[in-house]
Image (cartoon, rainbow, N blue to C red):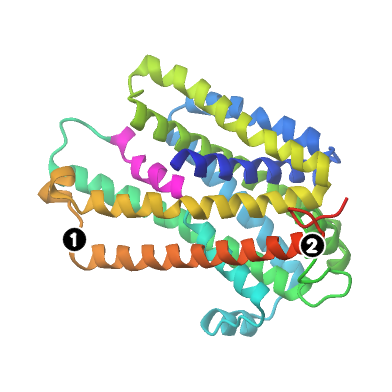
Amino acid sequence: MAMMATIAFDVAEVIGTAIGLEILFNFPLPLGIVISFFDTLLILVLQAWGMRKLEAVVESLLLTISVCFVIELGLSRPSPAELLKSALVPEIPTPAAALLAVSIFGSIIMPHNLFLHSSIVLPRRNPSWTPSQLASAIVYSSAETGVALFLSLLINVALLGVAAAKLYGSKGVGSEEDPPGLSDAAVLLQNLLGSEVARTAWGVALLAAGHSATVTGTLASQIICEGFFGLQSAGRQVRSSVLVNTLTRGLAMGPAVAAALVGGEAGADALVVGAQVAVALTLPFTVVPLLKFVSSTKIMGTDFCVGGWMLAAGWVVAAAAVVANGVGVVSTVGEWRSGWSGGAGMWGWSG
């Protein structure tokens, strides 16, 4: 299930990278998807530098995404008062908005990234460390993860702010039944904001997000395979790295190319939604065992076993995430069924 989540996540990053290439360089979508396959080679090169440098690359990509959306925010100029009001008292006016809210909440907690974040401390571990030194390393790793997630939150806030200020309710933007896709948004932002910079910033953000996701998804797939199949030795790690990276990206590229060829951009956008639903379905199979493991003294020992309010908070967050993802899955399946009955086809596009 963890590998299924990684592959589904990889589908979305392949499409996002391809659309970024289309926006910036006018590459056809299928060609961009094929080019994105070779991101795996980039990851293999970066891994040779060491984990710390790889983390620095990811942080640089996140910073790039942040700068792009700061530019978009500056051009769209949403009302600070409205942003604050909506943050404190959110409104969900329609079922479509509820589905969007659920999908945003659920997709933030990626199952495979739980494996990734749990493994970040391992390259820094020293066999001679005392329990207090190991605890200190865990604290620093948790702080780094927290900063990255907080930056991700700010990026999402900026994205929603731009959409609310310039896309929601604007003429020619589409409708709830036919919302604009990732590529459409670049053109719409350029037209509505009257600046080529808006289109370019959107494309760069998509490209940076795709490559950042490539790093995290690839590392997560390796960590999962190495842990479950005992591939931790140096020689096996190198061989498994090449095999897992190629296999994961290859399995993701197949449906992405098919959707792009059959349904074009609409098909690719619909596949991204489908991939997020698949990720949501795998979430309980990762979160629940993780909480069971970290609360077990047999696995964690008495020094690092999680309990008390932290464990209770973990179960509450896990339950909320599972319920939210469940609601999102049910709503999405309902929309697909409506699309079938309306003759729109499986993914809601027409030929």
Indicate whether 22 appears above or below 180. above
Q: Which residue occupies the foreground of this view, 46 or 328?
A: 328
Give the vertical position of 213 relative to 65 (above or below). Answer: above
Q: Position of residue 320 (x, y in %)?
A: 41, 68
Residue at 67 percent of width and 60 percent of height:
69
Mark 1 — residue? 307
Q: Position of residue 104 (x, y in %)?
A: 57, 64
Query: Foreground: 234 or 11?
Result: 11
Q: Say which amino acid is labelled 1.
A: Gly
Nearer to the camera, 97 or 173 = 97
Looking at the rendered structure, the kind of residue marked 2 is Pro
Q: Earlier in the sequence, mark 2 or mark 1?
A: 2
Assign a secondary structure to mark 2: loop
Where does residue 39 sit, x and y in percent of width and height? 63, 31
Give the magenta range: 111-124
- Residue 28 in picture, x, y percent from top left: 84, 38
Q: Residue at horizontal 26%, vertical 45%?
A: 137
User: Along the horizontal axis of the image, is 233 left or right of 9?
Assistant: left
Residue 210 horizontal side relative to residue 18, left or right: left
The answer to whether residue 112 is magenta is: yes
Q: Which residue is mark 2?
A: 180
